[in-house]
Amino acid sequence: MNDITQNPDRTSRGAEPLYRERSLQQPQYQYQQAAQMNAANGVPCPHCGAVNELDALFCASCGNAIGSATCPNCGAEIDADADFCETCRHYIRKDICSFCGANLTGTEAYCPECGSPRGGIVCPVCHTLNDFSFCKQCGTALTEEARQLREKVLAMPEFQQMQKLADEIQKLEMQIPYTTKADKERDRKSQELRQRVLMLLAQDRGLDRVDANLANHKVMSREEYDRKKKERLDMLSRLLDQMAQAPQAKPAQVRNYAMACKPQGVRLGWECNFKHALHSSPCGCAKPQMGGKWIILGKGTKKEIKDDI
């Protein structure tokens, strides 16, 4: 029978490596134990490392969103600071007015700041139900603040230039350029025939002139048509870049200003800074507060609109 009291040297030599191993691991063990205690007591911020309460959605130290949340309408996973679910396309914040961005208690039927109903506004033009100040379908201003904002934007020289270019592009798209000399000659004869018909109708009515102005009619070649259209599209694209939305504190501010700045007559999509996705408007973006811009849609557009309203 071996008695450990008879061989103390063996016992001390055998225990020494184990003691040293525990000594080396002690700092790492203490760090892991502290991290586990912090995780049990709160949620560390992925941006600054500060520990927050378990149910916190935003960091109390730096203000950034912590992790993700769940849409209360459909259950889809969303960012904690998103106010719109891109899965079910519903506005989900109960504590912030979607029309003006004012703080709410969650029980009001109407926003005390702008007076908009919590259930949304039906557009008087296209009858679409909207959660925001501008109709997501036709762009109509739905609140008094939105109408005032639209008037201010209409007076801006930059917007007037954008709308002029959009009108010129729309007129160009209504023309049919000729590709051969036969097409050009056919169009000339068609215009002459139209002129004679209008003159005969004017004479029947006892008039000596034709009301329609055909002098401005000019048939363009395909090359001239493509050149003029490209020039105007490039100019409009540069102006849209200049009017890009910078990040704002309130999502409602970005949505309202972007919708007010949208020129009519051309197909546009909203490219957000959140995921660089293409939406039909900022109304379909979960985090428009990060900014974005309108881009021209056409044959050269590679991106597809994420939401179809």
Image (cartoon, rainbow, N blue to C red):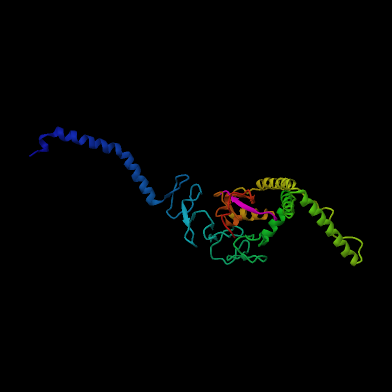
Q: How many marks?
A: 0
Left of 60 or right of it: where is 288?
right
Q: Nearer the viewer, residue 261 or 278?
A: 278
* Above or below 105: residue 236: above
Q: Nearer the viewer, residue 89 or 184?
A: 184
Residue 200's spot in the image, x, y percent? 88, 63
Identify which residue is drawn at 11% across, 37% down: 5
Residue 137's spot in the image, x, y percent? 63, 61
Q: What range of the chain is rendered magenta?
A: 264-273
* Above or below 72: residue 226: above
Residue 162 in magenta? no
Left of 216 or right of it: where is 298?
left
The residue most toward the front is 182
Left of 233 or right of it: where is 111?
left
Residue 219 visible, this orientation:
no
Q: Quadrant of the C terminus?
A: bottom right
The residue most toward the left is 1
Q: Nearer the viewer, residue 280 or 289?
A: 280
Q: Nearer the viewer, residue 135 or 184?
A: 184
Residue 69's spot in the image, x, y percent? 47, 56
Residue 14's spot in the image, x, y percent? 18, 35
Q: Quadrant of the N terminus?
A: top left
* Above or below 169: residue 134: below
The answer to which image quadrant residue 280 occupies is: bottom right
The answer to which image quadrant residue 150 occupies is: bottom right
Residue 251 visible, this orientation:
yes
